[in-house]
Structures are given as C-alpha cells and as structure tokens.
Amino acid sequence: MLAAAVLSTSPALGQEWKPVEQEQLYTVKGSTGPALYASIGERGPQIGGLVRTIAVTNFRLTWRRDYQPRNGGCVLASARPKLILTYTLPKPSARLSGTVKANWDTFIAGVREHEKVHGQMIIDMVHEIERISVGLTVENDPGCKKIRQELTGKLAAISQEQRRKSREFDQVELGNGGNIHQLILRLVNGG
C-alpha cells in the first residue's frame, strides 16, 4: 500500500505531458469527386508559400527548462515541453450524398490518418529532445550559456531527422500506388 502511494506521487509519473491536437478546416466546393479535388488544389494549404497540398500538420513547440549551475558547470535538470499540433484538412462547403459522400468519407479518413502519422513523428521528435536534453551537463559554464549552444546543435540534428522521415513518408504515401495516391484516385474516379 505504501509503495502504491509513493508511486502515485512520483514527479516523473505525474509530469507526463500530452500534446494538444487540433484541427483547422478549410472549405472546398463541389458536388463531385473531381470538383472537390480541383477545389483542394485551389484552396489547400500552401507549403513554403509555393505549393498547395491536401492537408498539412504544423506544430508549435515551447519549453520550460531548468538550467542549474553545479560545481562550476551547468546541468539541464528538467525540460518540459508544450506541444500544439494543428492538422489543416479540407471540408466540403455543402452536404454530400451517395457515392460521392462515401468516397469523400474514405478519402478524408485516410488523409486524417496520414496527418496523424506526421503528428506522431513530431511527438517522437519531442521525446528524443527530452531524452538528450535532461541531464545534459557542460563543465566550466557557471552562467549556463555554453550549455544552450551545445543543446541548440543537438536539436538541429534531431529536427533535420524528423523532417527527413516526414519527407520519406510523404514520398511513399503520395507516390504511384501509395495510400494517398489511391485515395485521390478513388475520390476523383469514383471507384
């Protein structure tokens, strides 16, 4: 009984963070699969201000970090993230019916699932940042300045790895025969 009470008050167990996940919808017009897909091409979110896409996952990540001077050095004693994931997805402006509705429902469920995979990749990245951050120690850093530079270098590599994985996932999913490619074909061709 005492062990259960001690475990339930452990800071590590009670401090587990969870991301905030939200959807941002943009409207598309049309009553047929081809019209809906054309509207996505006209209204979909832009990536880098250049290319329109069906959907996108964005995130905002902030940290509460506790840097502590110790024995002339500095240690990152804790790092608590706040992660907000925003999935931008299309939504028809009018009620759909029949086969178009069924195809749309399948399409948007697949697109949503695809974006959730991107979201999980971001969550995994944040866990990796936590893993390499907490306990990081830099000697001869009583002002806790060098440790920030060292951490920034490590974070850049983790971020680049997450982007690489995300690009590779999109190449497979959007490529010929990929899941998103198949969903698009079913929506447009009605199959």
Image: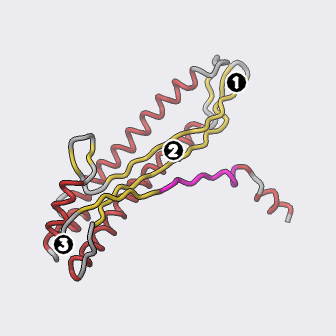
Given contact means CB atoms under 8 Å apart, are the residues at marks 2 and 3 in contact?
no
Q: Which mark is residue 31?
A: 3
Q: Quadrant of residue 72?
A: top right
Q: How many marks?
A: 3
Extent of the magenta region: 12-21
Q: Which residue is mark 1?
A: 69
Q: Which residue is mark 2?
A: 128
Earlier residue among tags 3 and 1: 3
Question: What residue is shown at x 77% (from left), y 55% (from top)?
Answer: 9
Q: Residues within 10 Å of mark 1 (few under 14, many from 20)?
A: some
- Against 39, is 124 above or below? above
Image location of residue 166, percent across then percent down: 34, 49
Query: Looking at numbered disc 1 in the image, what kind of residue is underneath it?
Result: Pro
**Residue 50 occupies quadrant:** top left
Q: Nearer the viewer, mark 3 or mark 1?
A: 3
Task: Please tell me how crowded label 2 is: few (under 14), some (14-19), or many (20+) other residues with Cα within 10 Å.
Answer: some
Q: Determine the CA span between mark 1 and mark 2.
A: 24 Å
User: Of helix, strand and loop, which one carries label 3?
Assistant: loop
* 12 left or right of 79 in image: right
**Residue at image x 28%, y 75%?**
95
The x and y percentages for residue 127 are: 53, 47
Of all residues shown, which one is farthest toward the bottom?
98
Viewer-nearest of discs 2 and 3 = 3
Q: Is residue 43 above or below residue 163?
A: below
Give the secondary structure at mark 2: helix
Q: Residues within 10 Å of mark 3 (few under 14, many from 20)?
A: some
